Image: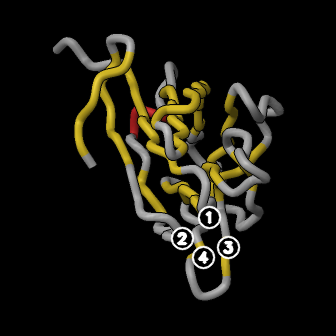
Amino acid sequence: MTATDSKGRTGIAYADASYTYTPKTFPSACTTETGCIIQQRIYDSKGLKLTRQYDYIQTTRAGDANDKWWSSYQTAGTYINGDAKYTYIIPGYSDNRLGILDDYYYSGKTDEKTETQWVFKDTSTSYGMEVYICYEQNSD
């Protein structure tokens, strides 16, 4: 993980080898009022193919055991991080071989059901991805 900058925002960059399903703890800024931006860069053998960007906000309410989230892809606002029901936070790419999922289970690889984590799924042999989680930097 390394610090990065995207459109004036500071955040964290992720890049894993294919077929790793390691859960990633996302920045706490994603649970603030302004949320964060998820930027996914898709690569093929020729280099950068496309860049996709989505907003994400996860709310935590006192006394509520569940953390509900919303993304500009999944706009219902009723998805719960930590409920063990996997959902794509951003759309899957290449027949869903590249994606970011909440509460993803894959036998022998991962069983992520933590309210502060996502799984970055990369099972494509034709494409790869980098993911940037960006958020506003405090000026204090």
Tag 4 near tag 3, CB within 8 Å:
yes
Query: Which image quadrant is residue 102 in?
Result: bottom right
Q: Reading the chain from its start, which is encountered first: label 3 or label 2?
A: 2
Real-space Cα distance between discs 4 and 3? 4 Å
- Single out the residue that lies furthest toward the bottom: 108
Is tag 1's residue or tag 3's residue first in the polypeptide sequence? 3
Q: Distance between the residues labelled 4 and 2?
A: 14 Å
CA gap between label 1 and label 4 equals: 17 Å
The residue that appears at 38% across and 41% down in the rendered structure is: 27
Give the Cα distance between marks 3 and 2: 13 Å
Q: What element carries label 4?
A: strand
Q: Which comes sooner in the sequence, label 1 or label 2?
A: 2
User: Residue lying farthest left?
Assistant: 140
The residue that mark 1 highlights is 123
Of labels 4 and 2, earlier in sequence is 2
Foreground of the two, 137 or 40: 40
Q: Are marks 1 and 3 in contact (CB under 8 Å)?
A: no
Residue under the image location 50 percent in, 19 percent down: 34
- Closest to the camera, between mark 3 and mark 2, is 2
Q: What residue type is labelled 1?
A: Thr
Label 3 crowd bin: few (<14), some (14–19), many (20+), radius 10 Å? some
Relative to residue 80, is residue 40 depicted above or below? above
Residue under label 2: 19
Callout in the foreground (1, 3): 1
Q: What residue type is labelled 4?
A: Asp
**Position of 37 relative to 132 (above/below):** above
The reply to whether residue 35 is in sight is yes
The residue wearing badge 4 is 111
Provide residue 133's location: percent of width, then percent of height: 43, 35
Q: What element carries label 1?
A: loop
Which circle marks residue 105 in the picture?
3
